[in-house]
Image (tube, helix red, strand yellow):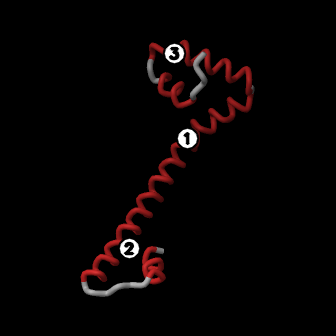
Amino acid sequence: MQAFCAPSVAAKAADPNQADRVRMYFSLLQASFGQALLRAVESIMIKGDAVTQWVQDQRTQGRIGGRAEGKAESVLAILSARGFSPSAEQRSAIAA
């Protein structure tokens, strides 16, 4: 038996050939979770998908962190090219 995977079911929901299967999964979930499932689905429909927002936030933070890390490496490379040798403490301060 295949395990339930919400993203997989959501992807299949877009496929009209899988509509019956999606209805079956939703019915099983509704039987298990009742009104809590309906409220969660309504919330996602109104507010958007919280997981998608979290993923977008993580990507943004990763980009910002990556840019900061790249800039710190550039500063250290420039200092090195100009003959400066920052100490380990100074390097960690630049990287922070």
Task: Decide which of 40, 6 is in the foreground and name it.
Answer: 6
Q: Which residue is mark 3?
A: 19
Q: Is residue 18 left or right of residue 34?
A: left
Disc number placed over residue 39 in the picture, else none: none
The residue that appears at 31% across and 83% down in the rendered structure is: 79
Q: Residue at x 50, y 53 (%)?
A: 58
Q: Is residue 32 above or below residue 40?
A: above
Q: Which is nearer the eye, 6 or 90?
A: 90
Query: Which of disc 1 and disc 3 is earlier in sequence?
Result: 3
- Which kind of residue does numbered mark 2 sit on? Ala
Badge 3 element: helix
Q: In front: mark 2 or mark 1?
A: 2
Residue 68 pos. (x, y %): 40, 69
User: Which label lies toward us, 3 or 2?
Assistant: 2
Residues tagged 3 and 2 counted as in contact (Cβ below 8 A): no
Q: Could you give the CA–CA distance between mark 3 and mark 2, rounded to whole angstroms?
A: 51 Å
Calculate the distance from the C-alpha at mark 3 to the C-alpha at mark 1. Answer: 21 Å
Circle 1 — which element? loop
**Residue type at tag 1:** Asp
Instruction: Name which quarter of the figure residue 24 lies in.
Output: top right
Q: Residue at x 45, y 57 (%)?
A: 62
Instruction: Please name the residue that numbered disc 2 is placed on.
Output: 72
Mark 1 = which residue?
Answer: 49
User: Along the polypeptide, which appears first: circle 3 or circle 2?
Assistant: 3
Kindly report the distance in space between the C-alpha atoms of the residues bearing marks 2 and 1: 35 Å
Q: Is residue 2 above or below residue 53?
A: above
Specify whether 81 is left or right of 65: left
Within-10-Å neighbours for mark 2: few <14, some 14–19, many 20+: some
- 22 up-or-down from 37: above or below: above
Q: Amino acid at mark 3?
A: Ala
Identify the residue at horizontal 29%, vertical 81% (top origin).
80
Mark 3 Cα-neighbour bin, 10 Å: few <14, some 14–19, many ≥20? some
